[in-house]
């Protein structure tokens, strides 16, 4: 591949990526989730593999095909995603957390279909509990030779919110982007801002495949 002009600068590196949404069951037929398409994370997984890395892609349910020659771990819930990340993280050189993890899950998933209006199984009031923060959990365990890349999808105060997440989650850098009305989720193009402890670096809007390489270029700068 090197002769074909594809740099193999991730050869010998283990890159793990979380992608897609998580789905949190209410009962056997209903769930809480979000609009993540998984496109960004899958594009990063493809790009990292192309550049020679061993790739682990930990993904919630999405409708795009799994990249070839990549170790894919399919999960549904945030708790399952956390477990898969705990398994993969210790050997990861670079970990990128692009998944849109559901912030809350129903406190109890009913084992039977809840009926509307039934007094014993009220669909009108679903008690939620907070999911663990996967990035913060692994960020706290980051070793001196590991690079942790977080993501932040924001509708407003993009930079200030990204800076707060950088510190709280012990990431090396946060890839921040604006979401809402036709932006980011499910689209093919995206513009992001790299926010680290020292600087803010904004990219122009570009296809997610190109952006994936730019994100990996950036992550490599932190690798010691
Ligand atoms: N993240 C995670 N586990 C969670 C929530 C978020 O690993 N339970 C990660 C995301 O994958 C992303 C980063 O944390 O890399 C920021 O996610 P985001 O949803 O923007 O931030 P939150 O901390 O959940 O805050 P909020 O949704 O309130 O903005
Ligand atoms: Ca969130």
Image (spheres, rainbow, N blue to C red):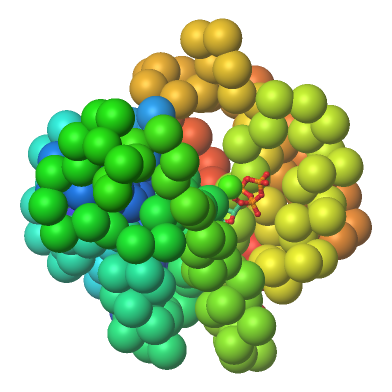
Q: Residue at x 68, y 32 (%)?
A: 154
For residue 223, what is the image quadrant?
A: bottom right
Residue 39, above or below 204? below
Q: Is residue 14 visible?
A: no
Residue 191 vs residue 122, the one in the foreground:
122
Q: Residue at x 80, y 44 (%)?
A: 161
Q: Residue at x 29, y 30 (%)?
A: 117
Query: Residue 116: x, y in percent?
Result: 25, 30
For residue 114, what is the image quadrant?
A: top left
> Is 217 placed left or right of 188 in the picture?
right
Residue 75, above or below 182? below
> Is 120 placed left or right of 148 in the picture?
left
Query: Residue 20: x, y in percent?
Result: 34, 44
Residue at the farthest top position: 181
Q: Is residue 94 visible?
A: yes
Query: Residue 129: x, y in percent?
Result: 52, 60
> Is 124 placed left or right of 202 in the picture?
left
> Is 205 placed left or right of 62 in the picture?
right
Query: Residue 198: x, y in percent?
Result: 89, 58
Residue 121 vs residue 51, the one in the foreground:
121
Q: Residue at x 33, y 78 (%)?
A: 83
Residue 146, above or below 216? below
Residue 78 vs residue 89, the one in the foreground:
78
| Quadrant of the rendering where the C terminus is positioned | bottom right
Residue 120 vs residue 180, the one in the foreground:
120
């Amino acid at each position: 591949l090197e002769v074909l002009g594809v740099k193999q600068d991730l050869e010998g590196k283990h890159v793990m990526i979380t992608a897609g949404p998580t789905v949190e069951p209410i009962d056997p037929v209903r769930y809480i989730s979000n609009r993540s398409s998984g496109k960004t994370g899958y594009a990063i997984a493809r790009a990292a593999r192309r550049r020679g890395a061993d790739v682990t892609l930990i993904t919630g349910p999405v409708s795009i095909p799994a990249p070839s020659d990549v170790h894919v771990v399919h999960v549904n819930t945030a708790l399952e995603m956390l477990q898969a990340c705990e398994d993969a993280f210790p050997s990861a050189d670079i970990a990128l957390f692009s998944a849109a993890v559901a912030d809350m899950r129903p406190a109890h998933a009913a084992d039977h279909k809840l009926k509307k209006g039934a007094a014993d199984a009220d669909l009108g009031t679903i008690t939620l509990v907070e999911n663990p923060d996967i990035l913060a959990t692994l960020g706290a365990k980051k070793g001196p030779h590991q690079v942790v890349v977080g993501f932040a999808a924001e509708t407003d105060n993009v930079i200030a919110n990204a800076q707060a997440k950088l510190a709280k989650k012990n990431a090396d850098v946060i890839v921040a982007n604006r979401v809402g009305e036709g932006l980011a989720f499910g689209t093919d193009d995206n513009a992001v801002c790299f926010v680290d402890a020292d600087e803010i670096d904004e990219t122009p809007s570009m296809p997610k495949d190109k952006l994936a390489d730019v994100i990996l270029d950036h992550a490599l700068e932190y690798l010691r």
